Image (tube, helix red, strand yellow):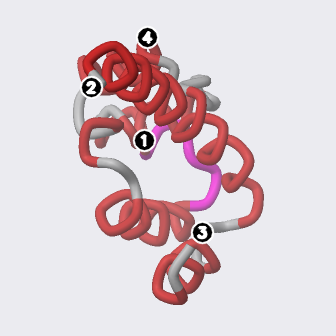
Amino acid sequence: MSDLGRQRWAKVPDQFKGGLELYIDEGVLPGNALTALLENDLKGTYNRFDDYANILPLLQWLYWGAPAPSWGSPVAVASWNARGGAMGVMGRKVAVEGLVG
């Protein structure tokens, strides 16, 4: 991870790091609050977060640090989950390249 990546990750509140990491890496859906945020559901996000101060650093991390296909709508989140996150996407890419090469 680059220094900039570490700086951005450092701003993510600790209680959300594990859920985000599992979601990005393996597509495992996090809790309701993070899922609403990932789906770009503003009303759901504000209804589910206990501390609104956590929302901005999470949004900043998503915008600058998360893979674009992993968030932004319910369809994007469901698709990322179904693919198995980054590991699933990379696994398929490696498998296809192995067949071609």
| Quadrant hosting residue 75 | top left
Residue 16 is a magenta residue: no
Task: Give the labeled residue for mark 4.
Answer: 82
- The one nearer the camera, 101 or 77, is 101
Image height check: is 21 above or below 15? above
The CA span between labels 4 and 1 is: 22 Å
Residue holding disc 1 = 45
> How far separated are the C-alphas under marks 2 and 4?
10 Å
Q: In percent of the image, x 32 and y 32: which residue is there?
A: 39
Q: Position of residue 3 (x, y in %)?
A: 54, 88
Q: From the viewer's perspective, is the residue at label 4 or at label 3 nearer?
A: 4
Q: Considering only order in the chain, which callout, 1 or 2, is on the residue closer to the N terminus?
A: 1
Q: Residue at x 30, y 62 (%)?
A: 63
Lower sequence index among marks 3 and 2: 3
Q: Which residue is mark 3?
A: 12
The residue at the point 35 percent across, 27 percent down is 93
Whole-angstrom CA distance, mark 3 to mark 2, is: 21 Å
Q: Could you tell me which secondary element the residue under label 4 belongs to?
A: helix
User: In the depicted view, which residue is nearer to us: 51 or 68?
Assistant: 68
Magenta residues span: 46-51
User: Which circle, 1 or 3, is nearer the viewer?
Assistant: 3
Label disc, if present, on residue 76 of the rendered structure? 2
Q: Is 10 left, or right, of 65 in this rendering? A: right
Front position among marks 2 and 1: 2
Q: Secondary structure at mark 3?
A: loop
Tell me what residue is drawn at x 64 percent, y 79 percent: 10
Amino acid type of the residue that numbered disc 4 sits on in the rendered structure: Ala
Q: Residue 84: where, in percent of width, then height?
A: 51, 20
Q: Quadrant of the N terminus?
A: bottom right
Amino acid, disc 1: Thr
Spot occupied by residue 99 in the image (x, y as percentages of width and height): 34, 13
